[in-house]
Image: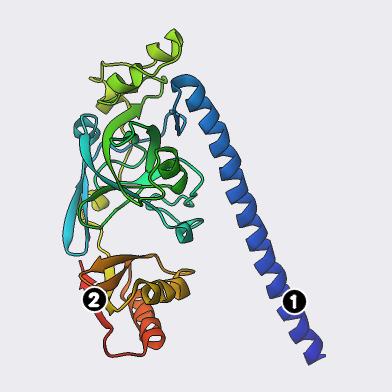
Amino acid sequence: MVVVLCLFSQLKRVIIYFMVVIIRSFYILFLLIFSISAQATTKQDYGIHGATLKYHKVSNKPYSYNVKGKTYAVKSIDKSKHYKAIGIASYYHQKFHGRRTANGEYFNNNSYTAAHNTLPINTYVLVTNLRNNRKVIVRINDRGPFSKGRIIDLSRLAAQKIGILNSGVAKVKLEALYVHKNGKVTGIGVKSLSKLAKTKDIKEKLSYEDKDLATNDKTKIDSQIEKKATSFFQLRVVGFSSQKSAEKTLYQLSNKYNGHIVKSGNKYDIYFGNLDTKGKIGQLKEKIKKLTRSPQFIVYEYNN
């Protein structure tokens, strides 16, 4: 009888596991189908690939957070609607596909999304590759990149459309866009987008009048969150002699932890984050020690 109960319990756990896997797979498939539909709409309206410009709630309340000892101040809509910048773009590694982003969505490398340090979540950005003038529209749903000198991390699909997969990085121009509840599109990127509009009706949705943007599209934020910066713990593993060895370690941990490799001189470092509790950072630290088993790998902790 005891044996039967044990077997039943194990079978139950296996069934639950496969149900979770199936549900998650269907969700990712749904995102893929949705992204293909979005691509068709944007291509039809503006002749470029990208996210469909539709209304998403955007906070007009500025706040700050800390990563790697640096404080990032997220802009209000009043300021970010004028955001225009030139810098280096990179793109997400495939291992992040299906993981949670900063706003709680599941990251989909086949959708038109991106990470930015200071633009409000759900801001749209017109991204132009300055080498070939190819453009794509992305929606900000994550934070990053935290590598020095980079201003945006694109999904793999977005990076592919503007031709930066082979090089890994590219010099780009970013222009902010916002969509109102009435469908109007405002922001500094409207001027560039209006030149791409395929019909008069599409062009009429683009508005240079943004005086009502901040008042019409406000969202509520918990007052305690506004007053306190979000803190994260970070881990950095330094001194890998080759990129291959760093990638091997990162791959062994990639199922549970987000990380990226940065070249430092002739060595390679791995940055892990954002870890929100000391318990998580302790668990990761122990796993890293078991994997590396060498005194040359030094683990640093950041408590921001």
The disc at residue 11 is 1
**Does the rendering let one see residue 11?**
yes
x and y, in percent, of residue 130 in the image = 28, 35
**Residue that protrudes farthest toward the top in the picture:** 200
Given residues 294 and 217, the one toward you in this image is: 294
- Dot 1 falls on a residue whose secondary structure is helix
Identify the colour scheme used: rainbow
Where residue 203 sits, quadrant-wise, is top left
Specify the quadrant that holds the C terminus.
bottom left
* Distance in Å between CA atoms under marks 1 and 2: 41 Å
**Disc 2: which residue:** 301
**Does the rendering let one see residue 235?**
no
Given residues 72 and 294, the one toward you in this image is: 294
Say what amino acid the circle numbered 1 marks: Leu
Specify the quadrant that holds the N terminus.
bottom right
Say what amino acid the circle numbered 2 marks: Glu
Above or below, comparing residue 199 to residue 235 in the picture: above
Q: Would you say 243 lies left or right of 253 here? A: left
